[in-house]
């Protein structure tokens, strides 16, 4: 991927973060408070139900190959 395209993609996701549609009136670059609100949505609505399904505790210290398998907020 060329550097110009990488910058365009990075800029898009920096100004349109995942779950940004959940926040009313989000325009332009998000603030620290915006990302805090997005984290709250993620924890309340997504991870509360999905963590047990993923069984992370059963796979601690294993290697995983992740090829675009989701939104990318698990680090």
Image: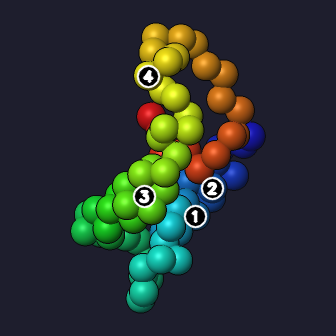
| 61 shown above or below 46 | above
- Residue 27, how many percent across, how many down? 44, 82
Q: Which of marks 1 and 3 is nearer the N terminus?
A: 1
The answer for how far apart the CA atoms under marks 2 and 4 are is: 33 Å
Q: Decide which of 8, 37 is in the foreground and name it.
A: 37
Q: Residue 57 carries which label?
A: 4
Q: Name the residue under label 3.
A: 42
The answer for how far apart the CA atoms under marks 4 and 1 are is: 34 Å
Q: Earlier in the sequence, mark 4 or mark 1?
A: 1
- Residue 58, how many percent across, how many down? 50, 18
* Foreground label between 3 and 2: 3
Q: Which of marks 4 and 3 is nearer the N terminus?
A: 3
Q: In which quarter of the image is residue 53?
A: top right
**Other residues around mark 1 within 10 Å, as few (<14) / some (14–19) / many (≥20):** few
Mark 1–mark 3 CB contact (< 8 Å): no
Taking the view exactly as shown, the residue that stands out farthest to the bottom is: 25
- Residue 56, how many percent across, how many down? 48, 26
Q: Which of marks 3 and 2 is nearer the N terminus?
A: 2
| 41 shown above or below 27 | above
Mark 4–mark 1 CB contact (< 8 Å): no
Q: Mark 1 points at which residue?
A: 12
Q: Which residue is drawn at 37% across and 55% down?
A: 43
Q: What element carries label 3?
A: helix
Q: Is mark 4 on a helix, strand or loop?
A: helix
Residue 35 visible in the picture: no
């Amino acid at each position: 991927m060329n550097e110009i395209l990488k910058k365009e993609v990075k800029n898009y996701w920096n100004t349109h973060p995942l779950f940004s549609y959940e926040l009313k009136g989000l325009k332009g670059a998000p603030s620290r408070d915006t990302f805090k609100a997005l984290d709250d949505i993620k924890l309340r609505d997504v991870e509360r139900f999905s963590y047990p399904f993923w069984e992370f505790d059963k796979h601690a210290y294993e290697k995983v190959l992740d090829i675009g398998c989701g939104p990318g907020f698990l680090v």
